[in-house]
Amino acid sequence: MKKILTLLVLLLTFTITAKSQNWGGGVDDEKIHFGFTFQYVSSEFKISRTPDWRTAPLNYNDGTMPVLPLTRITSESTPGFGLGFVVNNRLNRNMDLRLTPTLVFSDRKIDYIYTGADNNVHQKVQSTLVDFPLGLKIKSNRRKNYRAYLLGGVKYSMDITSEKKTSNQGKSAIDMVIQNKKNFASYEAGLGLDLYFEYFKMSPEIKYSASFNDILKPEANNPYSQSLDKLMLRHVTFSLFFE
């Protein structure tokens, strides 16, 4: 009988302790808390072409580029990575306002495919972005040590790539690079899962973002930009947040 009572007491103590334990370090109860994030980024352009896109580059050829008309202009997804911080403002039990300034290293690629050409042209647009995403995080109720959430918001981006890397001054036509605007805004939407550990919270998240407006910076003598009407930037980002 004593053994049974002892076992019941131990079981009751364990149950009370488990229920009272606030895994995640109590981060969800704080009005404002901080964290950091690691990101994998996949970037690509949505391309809008000019009416004469097939032959437009021929008018700006200095003899270093293919003289055949274009058949395709495509943009493949290219990988990148980001490092950032988290500033989380708890609005209520199921809603947070989040600012996640991030440094993103993510190049972009455009392929120019010419009719019957053996050597096509592959443009690599180098980019180092400082992003300032502001989002609203809508959370489900917590179930034991996890909860799901949806995220939506806007992002302001500044490209801090050096002018030396992007300048076309003194370059032949084939060596010129596409110019992008240095500042632009995007919209974002995503979903994730909060996972609670004893002293911290980890959140895997996937997010899609796209620029509101055209980010192409046209140049009068750049054969690569003559075929392009607009370039819209799209990102798919997988993040791990630690708070």
Image (tube, grey):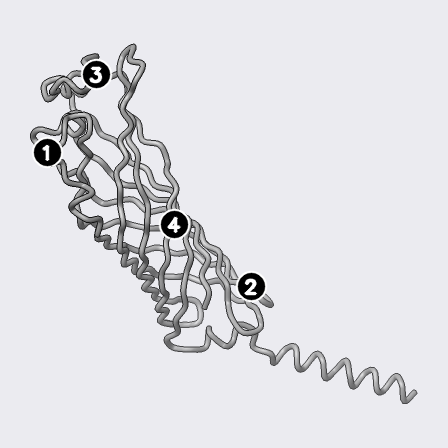
Task: Report, in whole angstroms, how far the alpha carbon at label 4 lies from the one at label 3.
Answer: 34 Å
Residue that lies at the very extreme toward the left in this rendered image = 220
Please report contact status of discs 2 and 3: CB closer than 8 Å, yes or no: no
Instruction: Give the residue at mark 2.
Output: 146
**Of tags 2 and 1, which is closer to the observer?**
1
Type of residue at label 4? Phe
Residue at the image position 15 percent from the left and 21 percent from the top: 57
Report crowding for label 3: few under 14, some 14 to 19, many 20 or more residues within 10 A (C-alpha).
some
| Up/down of 153 relative to 34, above or below | above
Q: Residue 170 shows which numbered tag? A: 1
Please report contact status of discs 4 and 2: CB closer than 8 Å, yes or no: no
Q: Earlier in the sequence, mark 2 or mark 3?
A: 3
Task: Report, in whole angstroms, how far the alpha carbon at label 4 lies from the one at label 2.
Answer: 26 Å
Report crowding for label 2: few under 14, some 14 to 19, many 20 or more residues within 10 A (C-alpha).
some
**Of tags 4 and 3, which is closer to the observer?**
3
Picture coordinates of residue 241, whole percent (x, y): 45, 61
Q: Earlier in the sequence, mark 3 or mark 1?
A: 3
Type of residue at label 1? Gly
Q: Secondary structure at mark 3?
A: loop
Instruction: Give the residue at mark 3.
Output: 66
Q: Residue 81 shows which numbered tag? A: 4
Q: Earlier in the sequence, mark 1 or mark 4?
A: 4
Please report contact status of discs 4 and 3: CB closer than 8 Å, yes or no: no
**Of tags 3 and 1, which is closer to the observer?**
1
Quarter of the picture holding the N terminus: bottom right
Q: Earlier in the sequence, mark 2 or mark 1?
A: 2
**In the image, 5: left or right of 43?**
right
Type of residue at label 2? Tyr
**Of tags 1 and 4, which is closer to the observer?**
1
Q: Earlier in the sequence, mark 4 or mark 3?
A: 3
The number of numbered discs placed on residues in the rendered structure image is 4
